[in-house]
Image: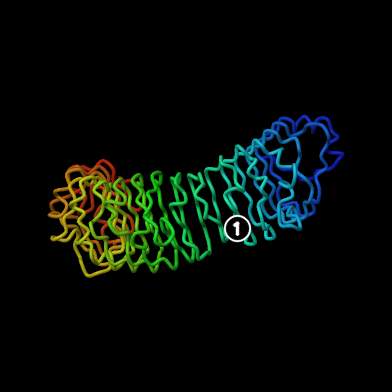
Amino acid sequence: MSCISALTEDFYGDTRATMAFTSLKKLGIEKMPELEKWHIPKYEVFNNLEELYIIDCPKLIGELPQQCSSLRILEISRCDSLVLPNGQLSIFNGNNIQQFTSLCDLKISNLKSLKGLCLELNQLVKLQRLSIVDCGSLLPFLPSYLPSSLKVLNYEGCCNLEVESENWQLEDLTLVNYDSHKVVCLGRFPMLKSLEILNCKSTGIGSQNSGAATSVMTSLQTLTISGSVDLISFPEGRLPAAPKLTQLHLWNCKKLKFLPQQMDSLFPSLRHLFISCCPNIECLPEGGLPSSLQCLDISTCKKLISRRREWGVAKLPSLTQFRIGGIDDEVESFPEEDWLLPCTLQSLQLWAHKNLKKLSYSGLRHLCSLQTLYIRNCTRLQSLPEEGLPASLTTLEIEKCPLLKPRLRWKKGQDWPKVARIPCIIVDLELVP
């Protein structure tokens, strides 16, 4: 990225400098606390500029160059003087919007006095991605303020996003530190493919307003909820069906007790389910998990893991990846005799099993498709099964298992004969031998 340290009339008057800027495609103006105004020549200078970044220029009040007809990416951060007394950005004021008709990606961040987005913003007919970060004074705005071309909206550290209209054509929505007591009605986003709700204190999720029939999100493929402090459960009858949902991530939701009911019918295409650091989830939903599930990752969920025998993983015909972490009960052997794993497994990962001392050969021998076994931070694990590991295994990775490590030394370790035939053995991130 090219950076300008000073912008003066004399500098622009230099023919060689003008020629250099004519061919410039990427420009960054950063950390210039005394810069107040650009001195823009009348002739074209930035006609090939595609990316412009203006960061940490708190006194800048001048207009942007009007020659940016090729500009595709624009980022403005910590430039509070670009905000007019009415709370709108000066660069999008009046007819200035016409010079940004090629803009595809706009990021606005850390503008403390920004209060509104001008209605003319909807004239940016090529805008596909909009990111608004840490603009805490921003007032609610309607979808009519945004162009119909917009596909991606990242809304971080702001509040009161207005979602009452059903005309949003967004495909990707990210809400971070979104502090609002309004329910995020997923039915308002019929084209949405990906939704992330991260560190939102007052998370409410539903399909329609209270009392309305449950909608169907025909396009949603990925749903991620992380750090939602107040989320206790998914309201019954209000979470929309998502027939194309393939990934569901739940992380660090401390109060969450219950998963969506009837997941097998709501999410018939679900392939990846990740649940981590949700200590109060009590059990999997009635009806079990979708038969389409290929990857199940559950860790640091004390109550849920204590009822692992009820998960019914052996009945999942498509499950190929299974990761379980944070077993802190008194069980010393994995898997337990009364807990059958599916023979379809290709990858098995165990980590932070507090009292694990040995692996059960009887519980592993039927895993005829298992290719990768990864064991991490099992500090009491003493040895591998006397009978060895499944013959299909191609990769064994051991990390932070101090009692087992010396037993896997090349040709010398006590357990080396059990693993010598495995093509790839990694111990504490080092390939053996």
Question: In this image, 192 relative to 102: left or right?
Answer: left
Q: Position of residue 290 (x, y in %)?
A: 26, 50
Q: Between 106 and 187, which is closer to the camera in this rendering? A: 187
x and y percentages locating residue 266 in the rendered image: 31, 52
Whether residue 234 sits left or right of residue 157 in the image: it is left
Say which residue label 1 marks. Answer: 140
| Nearer the observer, 219 or 78 | 219
Q: Quadrant of the image for the C terminus?
A: top left
Q: Residue at x 38, y 67 (%)?
A: 232
Q: Is residue 372 above or below residue 307?
A: above
Q: Residue 377 location in percent, x, y?
A: 32, 60
> Which amino acid, mark 1?
Pro
Q: Is residue 273 visible?
A: yes
* Mark 1 residue element: loop
Q: What is the tally of numbered marks visible in this picture?
A: 1
Question: Residue placed at 62% from the left, 61% from the top?
Answer: 136
Residue 5, quarter of picture: top right
Question: From where the camera sits, is residue 405 visible?
Answer: no
Quarter of the rendering containing residue 74: top right
Q: Is residue 182 above or below residue 130?
A: below
In percent of width and height, residue 25 lies at 67, 34
Q: Give the crowd class for mark 1: few <14, some 14-19, many >=20 residues within 10 Å.
A: some
| Residue 312 position (above or below residue 392) | below
The foreground one among 25 and 71 is 71
Colour pattern of the rendering = rainbow
Residue depicted at x 35% and y 44%: 244
Q: Name the quadrant of the N terminus.
A: top right
- Residue 140 placement: quadrant: bottom right
Q: Is residue 4 above or below residue 223?
A: above
